[in-house]
Protein backbone atom coordinates (compact mmCIF):
# COMPACT_ATOMS: atom_id res chain seq x y z
CA UNK A 1 0.00 0.00 0.00
CA UNK A 2 1.30 3.46 -0.87
CA UNK A 3 1.53 6.16 1.80
CA UNK A 4 -1.18 8.19 0.05
CA UNK A 5 -3.48 5.14 0.13
CA UNK A 6 -2.73 4.61 3.82
CA UNK A 7 -3.54 8.25 4.63
CA UNK A 8 -6.74 7.97 2.59
CA UNK A 9 -7.93 4.77 4.24
CA UNK A 10 -6.84 5.53 7.80
CA UNK A 11 -6.93 9.28 8.42
CA UNK A 12 -7.92 8.98 12.09
CA UNK A 13 -7.83 6.65 15.09
CA UNK A 14 -11.57 6.06 14.57
CA UNK A 15 -11.03 4.83 11.02
CA UNK A 16 -8.48 2.28 12.32
CA UNK A 17 -10.82 1.20 15.13
CA UNK A 18 -13.67 0.72 12.71
CA UNK A 19 -11.52 -1.31 10.27
CA UNK A 20 -10.08 -3.49 13.03
CA UNK A 21 -13.53 -4.02 14.57
CA UNK A 22 -14.85 -5.29 11.21
CA UNK A 23 -11.90 -7.67 10.83
CA UNK A 24 -12.46 -9.01 14.35
CA UNK A 25 -16.15 -9.55 13.68
CA UNK A 26 -15.37 -11.51 10.50
CA UNK A 27 -12.84 -13.64 12.41
CA UNK A 28 -15.24 -14.10 15.35
CA UNK A 29 -15.01 -12.51 18.80
CA UNK A 30 -15.52 -14.86 21.76
CA UNK A 31 -16.22 -13.88 25.35
CA UNK A 32 -13.18 -14.80 27.49
CA UNK A 33 -15.52 -15.76 30.36
CA UNK A 34 -18.21 -17.87 28.73
CA UNK A 35 -16.91 -18.48 25.20
CA UNK A 36 -20.06 -17.09 23.55
CA UNK A 37 -19.51 -15.42 20.16
CA UNK A 38 -20.57 -11.81 19.93
CA UNK A 39 -20.54 -8.92 17.49
CA UNK A 40 -22.30 -6.46 19.79
CA UNK A 41 -20.24 -3.28 19.66
CA UNK A 42 -20.07 -0.64 22.42
CA UNK A 43 -19.21 2.44 20.38
CA UNK A 44 -18.11 4.75 23.20
CA UNK A 45 -15.95 2.13 24.89
CA UNK A 46 -14.19 0.69 21.83
CA UNK A 47 -15.19 -2.76 23.06
CA UNK A 48 -17.48 -5.65 22.25
CA UNK A 49 -20.06 -6.85 24.75
CA UNK A 50 -20.86 -10.45 25.57
CA UNK A 51 -24.55 -11.06 24.93
CA UNK A 52 -24.66 -13.70 27.71
CA UNK A 53 -22.70 -12.37 30.70
CA UNK A 54 -22.63 -8.72 29.63
CA UNK A 55 -18.89 -8.25 30.13
CA UNK A 56 -17.07 -5.91 27.82
CA UNK A 57 -14.31 -7.29 25.60
CA UNK A 58 -11.75 -4.65 24.58
CA UNK A 59 -11.15 -4.39 20.84
CA UNK A 60 -7.53 -5.49 21.22
CA UNK A 61 -8.22 -8.36 23.66
CA UNK A 62 -6.67 -11.57 22.31
CA UNK A 63 -4.71 -9.72 19.62
CA UNK A 64 -1.07 -8.76 19.28
CA UNK A 65 -1.98 -5.23 20.44
CA UNK A 66 -3.34 -6.42 23.78
CA UNK A 67 -1.70 -4.56 26.72
CA UNK A 68 -0.15 -1.97 24.38
CA UNK A 69 -0.57 1.69 25.27
CA UNK A 70 0.12 2.79 21.70
CA UNK A 71 -2.83 3.89 19.60
CA UNK A 72 -4.25 1.58 16.97
CA UNK A 73 -3.21 4.09 14.31
CA UNK A 74 0.39 3.88 15.54
CA UNK A 75 0.24 0.10 15.13
CA UNK A 76 -1.34 0.49 11.70
CA UNK A 77 1.31 3.01 10.68
CA UNK A 78 4.12 0.70 11.84
CA UNK A 79 2.53 -2.21 9.96
CA UNK A 80 2.27 -0.02 6.88
CA UNK A 81 5.97 0.91 7.13
CA UNK A 82 7.01 -2.70 7.67
CA UNK A 83 5.04 -3.96 4.68
CA UNK A 84 5.44 -1.15 2.18
CA UNK A 85 9.19 -1.41 1.67
CA UNK A 86 11.17 -4.42 0.58
CA UNK A 87 13.96 -3.97 3.12
CA UNK A 88 13.66 -4.53 6.86
CA UNK A 89 13.33 -1.51 9.17
CA UNK A 90 14.91 -0.70 12.50
CA UNK A 91 12.78 0.25 15.49
CA UNK A 92 14.82 3.48 15.71
CA UNK A 93 13.71 4.46 12.21
CA UNK A 94 10.07 3.68 12.95
CA UNK A 95 10.32 5.61 16.25
CA UNK A 96 11.63 8.58 14.25
CA UNK A 97 8.93 8.30 11.59
CA UNK A 98 6.16 8.02 14.17
CA UNK A 99 7.66 10.77 16.36
CA UNK A 100 7.32 8.65 19.49
CA UNK A 101 9.43 9.81 22.41
CA UNK A 102 10.06 6.43 24.01
CA UNK A 103 12.02 3.70 22.26
CA UNK A 104 10.84 0.60 24.23
CA UNK A 105 7.18 0.63 23.07
CA UNK A 106 8.22 0.89 19.41
CA UNK A 107 10.84 -1.84 19.78
CA UNK A 108 8.29 -4.03 21.54
CA UNK A 109 5.62 -3.40 18.89
CA UNK A 110 7.97 -4.40 16.06
CA UNK A 111 9.31 -7.46 17.88
CA UNK A 112 5.75 -8.61 18.59
CA UNK A 113 4.85 -8.19 14.93
CA UNK A 114 7.93 -10.23 13.93
CA UNK A 115 6.88 -12.82 16.50
CA UNK A 116 3.39 -13.26 15.02
CA UNK A 117 4.81 -13.35 11.47
CA UNK A 118 6.73 -16.45 12.59
CA UNK A 119 3.66 -17.93 14.25
CA UNK A 120 1.68 -17.47 11.04
CA UNK A 121 4.31 -19.07 8.81
CA UNK A 122 4.71 -22.01 11.20
CA UNK A 123 1.22 -23.28 10.32
CA UNK A 124 2.41 -24.10 6.80
CA UNK A 125 4.62 -27.01 5.78
CA UNK A 126 7.03 -26.90 2.86
CA UNK A 127 6.48 -29.65 0.30
CA UNK A 128 7.27 -31.14 -3.09
CA UNK A 129 10.99 -30.38 -3.47
CA UNK A 130 13.18 -28.38 -1.09
CA UNK A 131 16.79 -27.19 -0.96
CA UNK A 132 18.23 -27.34 2.56
CA UNK A 133 21.44 -25.98 4.06
CA UNK A 134 22.91 -24.56 7.23
CA UNK A 135 24.20 -20.99 7.34
CA UNK A 136 26.11 -18.82 9.80
CA UNK A 137 24.83 -15.37 10.69
CA UNK A 138 27.01 -12.80 12.48
CA UNK A 139 25.83 -11.97 16.00
CA UNK A 140 26.98 -9.84 18.90
CA UNK A 141 29.21 -11.84 21.23
CA UNK A 142 27.02 -13.00 24.14
CA UNK A 143 27.66 -11.36 27.52
CA UNK A 144 28.92 -14.60 29.05
CA UNK A 145 31.44 -15.11 26.24
CA UNK A 146 32.98 -11.62 26.41
CA UNK A 147 36.64 -11.76 27.29
CA UNK A 148 36.95 -15.30 25.96
CA UNK A 149 39.20 -16.14 23.04
CA UNK A 150 37.13 -15.95 19.83
CA UNK A 151 36.81 -19.36 18.20
CA UNK A 152 36.90 -19.77 14.43
CA UNK A 153 34.42 -21.73 12.29
CA UNK A 154 31.17 -23.39 13.33
CA UNK A 155 31.76 -22.95 17.07
CA UNK A 156 32.48 -19.20 16.91
CA UNK A 157 30.79 -17.03 19.55
CA UNK A 158 30.31 -14.40 16.82
CA UNK A 159 28.07 -16.58 14.69
CA UNK A 160 24.66 -18.17 15.03
CA UNK A 161 23.72 -21.32 13.17
CA UNK A 162 20.64 -21.08 10.98
CA UNK A 163 18.84 -23.87 9.16
CA UNK A 164 17.49 -22.63 5.82
CA UNK A 165 14.88 -24.54 3.81
CA UNK A 166 13.63 -23.37 0.44
CA UNK A 167 10.95 -24.87 -1.79
CA UNK A 168 12.30 -24.87 -5.33
CA UNK A 169 11.89 -26.75 -8.56
CA UNK A 170 13.81 -26.90 -11.84
CA UNK A 171 12.51 -24.34 -14.33
CA UNK A 172 11.79 -27.10 -16.87
CA UNK A 173 9.54 -28.97 -14.39
CA UNK A 174 7.51 -25.83 -13.69
CA UNK A 175 7.25 -24.99 -17.40
CA UNK A 176 5.95 -28.49 -18.09
CA UNK A 177 3.35 -28.14 -15.31
CA UNK A 178 2.13 -24.84 -16.76
CA UNK A 179 1.94 -26.23 -20.26
CA UNK A 180 0.05 -29.34 -19.09
CA UNK A 181 -2.56 -27.14 -17.43
CA UNK A 182 -2.97 -25.46 -20.83
CA UNK A 183 -5.16 -22.63 -19.57
CA UNK A 184 -4.74 -19.09 -20.88
CA UNK A 185 -3.30 -18.03 -17.51
CA UNK A 186 -0.86 -20.96 -17.22
CA UNK A 187 0.46 -20.40 -20.74
CA UNK A 188 0.98 -16.71 -19.94
CA UNK A 189 2.87 -17.73 -16.79
CA UNK A 190 4.99 -20.22 -18.78
CA UNK A 191 5.99 -17.57 -21.30
CA UNK A 192 6.91 -15.12 -18.50
CA UNK A 193 8.96 -17.78 -16.71
CA UNK A 194 10.78 -18.85 -19.90
CA UNK A 195 11.83 -15.22 -20.51
CA UNK A 196 12.95 -14.79 -16.90
CA UNK A 197 14.92 -18.05 -16.96
CA UNK A 198 16.73 -16.84 -20.07
CA UNK A 199 17.77 -13.62 -18.28
CA UNK A 200 19.04 -15.18 -15.04
CA UNK A 201 21.49 -17.98 -14.53
CA UNK A 202 19.43 -19.75 -11.83
CA UNK A 203 17.81 -22.84 -13.33
CA UNK A 204 15.25 -23.22 -10.55
CA UNK A 205 12.08 -21.49 -9.45
CA UNK A 206 11.68 -20.57 -5.77
CA UNK A 207 8.40 -20.74 -3.87
CA UNK A 208 8.23 -20.58 -0.03
CA UNK A 209 11.05 -20.47 2.52
CA UNK A 210 11.71 -21.10 6.23
CA UNK A 211 14.66 -20.22 8.47
CA UNK A 212 15.40 -21.39 12.01
CA UNK A 213 18.11 -20.44 14.50
CA UNK A 214 19.55 -23.71 15.83
CA UNK A 215 21.84 -24.38 18.77
CA UNK A 216 23.85 -27.11 17.10
CA UNK A 217 24.15 -29.04 13.85
CA UNK A 218 23.27 -32.46 15.24
CA UNK A 219 21.02 -34.79 13.22
CA UNK A 220 18.65 -34.90 16.16
CA UNK A 221 18.23 -31.09 16.21
CA UNK A 222 17.62 -30.93 12.46
CA UNK A 223 15.27 -33.94 12.42
CA UNK A 224 12.93 -32.32 14.94
CA UNK A 225 12.61 -29.19 12.79
CA UNK A 226 12.40 -30.77 9.36
CA UNK A 227 9.83 -33.38 10.42
CA UNK A 228 7.60 -30.60 11.71
CA UNK A 229 8.05 -28.13 8.88
CA UNK A 230 8.47 -30.29 5.77
CA UNK A 231 5.77 -32.58 4.43
CA UNK A 232 6.80 -36.25 4.40
CA UNK A 233 6.01 -36.48 0.70
CA UNK A 234 8.94 -34.19 -0.21
CA UNK A 235 12.28 -34.62 -1.95
CA UNK A 236 15.09 -32.95 0.03
CA UNK A 237 18.14 -31.72 -1.84
CA UNK A 238 21.25 -30.97 0.23
CA UNK A 239 25.04 -31.07 0.31
CA UNK A 240 24.93 -34.45 2.08
CA UNK A 241 26.09 -33.19 5.48
CA UNK A 242 26.28 -35.82 8.23
CA UNK A 243 23.48 -33.92 10.02
CA UNK A 244 21.14 -35.05 7.22
CA UNK A 245 21.70 -38.74 7.82
CA UNK A 246 18.10 -39.49 8.82
CA UNK A 247 16.39 -37.74 5.87
CA UNK A 248 16.57 -40.84 3.70
CA UNK A 249 13.74 -43.21 4.46
CA UNK A 250 11.67 -40.61 6.30
CA UNK A 251 11.00 -38.29 3.37
CA UNK A 252 9.87 -39.32 -0.11
CA UNK A 253 13.35 -38.65 -1.51
CA UNK A 254 16.76 -37.41 -0.50
CA UNK A 255 19.29 -36.12 -3.03
CA UNK A 256 22.83 -35.78 -1.70
CA UNK A 257 25.22 -33.66 -3.71
CA UNK A 258 28.67 -34.24 -2.31
CA UNK A 259 30.73 -33.43 -5.43
CA UNK A 260 34.08 -31.77 -4.73
CA UNK A 261 33.18 -28.73 -6.87
CA UNK A 262 31.15 -26.77 -4.31
CA UNK A 263 30.39 -23.88 -6.71
CA UNK A 264 28.87 -26.25 -9.21
CA UNK A 265 26.72 -27.93 -6.51
CA UNK A 266 25.45 -24.54 -5.35
CA UNK A 267 24.77 -23.30 -8.87
CA UNK A 268 23.04 -26.42 -10.11
CA UNK A 269 21.34 -27.97 -7.09
CA UNK A 270 21.21 -25.47 -4.23
CA UNK A 271 20.95 -22.05 -5.87
CA UNK A 272 18.00 -20.55 -4.01
CA UNK A 273 18.98 -21.56 -0.53
CA UNK A 274 22.20 -19.58 -1.06
CA UNK A 275 20.48 -16.59 -2.66
CA UNK A 276 18.10 -16.44 0.30
CA UNK A 277 20.92 -16.74 2.87
CA UNK A 278 22.89 -13.96 1.15
CA UNK A 279 19.94 -11.57 0.88
CA UNK A 280 18.75 -12.14 4.43
CA UNK A 281 22.20 -11.89 6.00
CA UNK A 282 23.11 -8.68 4.19
CA UNK A 283 19.66 -7.15 4.82
CA UNK A 284 19.87 -7.75 8.57
CA UNK A 285 23.51 -6.60 8.76
CA UNK A 286 22.74 -3.39 6.83
CA UNK A 287 19.85 -2.34 9.06
CA UNK A 288 20.46 -3.89 12.45
CA UNK A 289 24.25 -4.35 12.42
CA UNK A 290 25.32 -7.00 14.90
CA UNK A 291 22.22 -8.56 16.41
CA UNK A 292 21.75 -10.33 19.68
CA UNK A 293 21.31 -14.08 19.14
CA UNK A 294 18.02 -14.06 21.07
CA UNK A 295 16.53 -11.58 18.53
CA UNK A 296 17.83 -13.25 15.38
CA UNK A 297 14.84 -15.60 14.96
CA UNK A 298 12.49 -12.59 15.02
CA UNK A 299 14.43 -10.88 12.21
CA UNK A 300 14.43 -14.13 10.24
CA UNK A 301 10.65 -14.36 10.75
CA UNK A 302 10.19 -10.93 9.19
CA UNK A 303 12.41 -11.75 6.21
CA UNK A 304 10.66 -15.09 5.56
CA UNK A 305 7.15 -13.70 6.05
CA UNK A 306 7.77 -10.93 3.54
CA UNK A 307 9.60 -13.21 1.11
CA UNK A 308 6.74 -15.72 1.22
CA UNK A 309 4.30 -12.96 0.36
CA UNK A 310 6.46 -11.11 -2.13
CA UNK A 311 3.68 -11.04 -4.72
CA UNK A 312 1.32 -9.13 -2.42
CA UNK A 313 2.13 -5.47 -2.76
CA UNK A 314 0.75 -2.05 -3.47
CA UNK A 315 -2.66 -3.31 -4.41
CA UNK A 316 -5.76 -1.16 -4.00
CA UNK A 317 -7.62 -4.39 -3.29
CA UNK A 318 -7.12 -5.29 0.42
CA UNK A 319 -7.24 -8.96 -0.60
CA UNK A 320 -3.86 -8.62 -2.32
CA UNK A 321 -2.23 -6.08 -0.04
CA UNK A 322 0.52 -7.08 2.36
CA UNK A 323 -0.55 -4.53 4.98
CA UNK A 324 -4.01 -6.09 5.15
CA UNK A 325 -2.46 -9.54 5.52
CA UNK A 326 -0.51 -8.32 8.53
CA UNK A 327 -3.51 -6.61 10.14
CA UNK A 328 -5.47 -9.85 9.78
CA UNK A 329 -2.84 -11.90 11.61
CA UNK A 330 -2.45 -9.10 14.18
CA UNK A 331 -6.10 -9.73 15.04
CA UNK A 332 -5.70 -13.45 15.71
CA UNK A 333 -2.25 -13.96 17.23
CA UNK A 334 -0.86 -12.77 20.55
CA UNK A 335 2.76 -12.33 21.51
CA UNK A 336 4.18 -12.66 24.99
CA UNK A 337 7.44 -10.84 24.27
CA UNK A 338 8.12 -8.29 27.01
CA UNK A 339 10.52 -5.38 27.06
CA UNK A 340 11.97 -6.42 30.41
CA UNK A 341 12.92 -9.83 29.01
CA UNK A 342 15.20 -8.18 26.52
CA UNK A 343 16.20 -4.88 28.01
CA UNK A 344 19.30 -3.51 26.37
CA UNK A 345 21.44 -0.76 27.83
CA UNK A 346 21.01 2.52 25.91
CA UNK A 347 24.44 2.27 24.31
CA UNK A 348 23.47 -1.00 22.67
CA UNK A 349 20.21 0.15 21.16
CA UNK A 350 20.40 0.02 17.38
ZN1 LIG B 1 -19.60 -13.79 28.47
Image: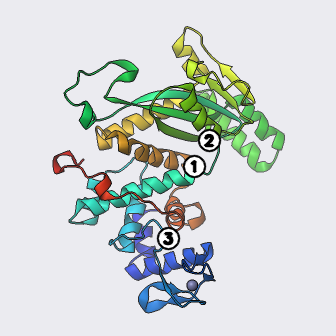
Secondary structure under the numbered disc 3 in the rendered image: loop
Secondary structure under the numbered disc 2 in the rendered image: helix
Q: Is residue 254 left or right of residue 337?
A: right
Residue at the top extreme of this rendering = 260
Asked where in the image residue 227 lies, by quadrant, the reply is top right
Depth check: give the residue in front, 143 or 229. Answer: 143
Above/below status of 258 relative to 10: above
Asked where in the image residue 320 lies, by quadrant, the reply is bottom right
Q: Which numbered disc covers residue 229? A: 2
Q: Position of residue 342 (x, y in %)?
A: 30, 51
Residues at marks 1 and 2, CA–CA distance in whole angstroms: 7 Å
Split into quadrants, the picture shows ligand 1 in the one at: bottom right
Colour scheme shown: rainbow
| Mark 2 residue crowding within 10 angstroms, few (<14) / some (14–19) / many (20+) | some
Residue topped by disc 3: 62
Residue topped by disc 1: 122
Say which residue appears at 37% left-offset and 57% top-offset: 110
| Mark 3 residue crowding within 10 angstroms, few (<14) / some (14–19) / many (20+) | some
Q: Are marks 1 and 2 in contact (CB under 8 Å)?
A: yes
Amino acid sequence: MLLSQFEGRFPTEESCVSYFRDIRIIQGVSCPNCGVKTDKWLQGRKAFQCTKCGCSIPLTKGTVMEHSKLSLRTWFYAMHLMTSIKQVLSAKEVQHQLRIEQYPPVWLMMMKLRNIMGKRDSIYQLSDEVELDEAFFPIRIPEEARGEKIKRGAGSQQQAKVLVIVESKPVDTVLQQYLCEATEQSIRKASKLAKKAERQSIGKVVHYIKMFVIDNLSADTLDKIVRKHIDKDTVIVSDGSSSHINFEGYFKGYERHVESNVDSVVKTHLPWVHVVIGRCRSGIAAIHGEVDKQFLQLYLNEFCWKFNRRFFKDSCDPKYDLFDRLVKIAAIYTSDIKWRDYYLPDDEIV
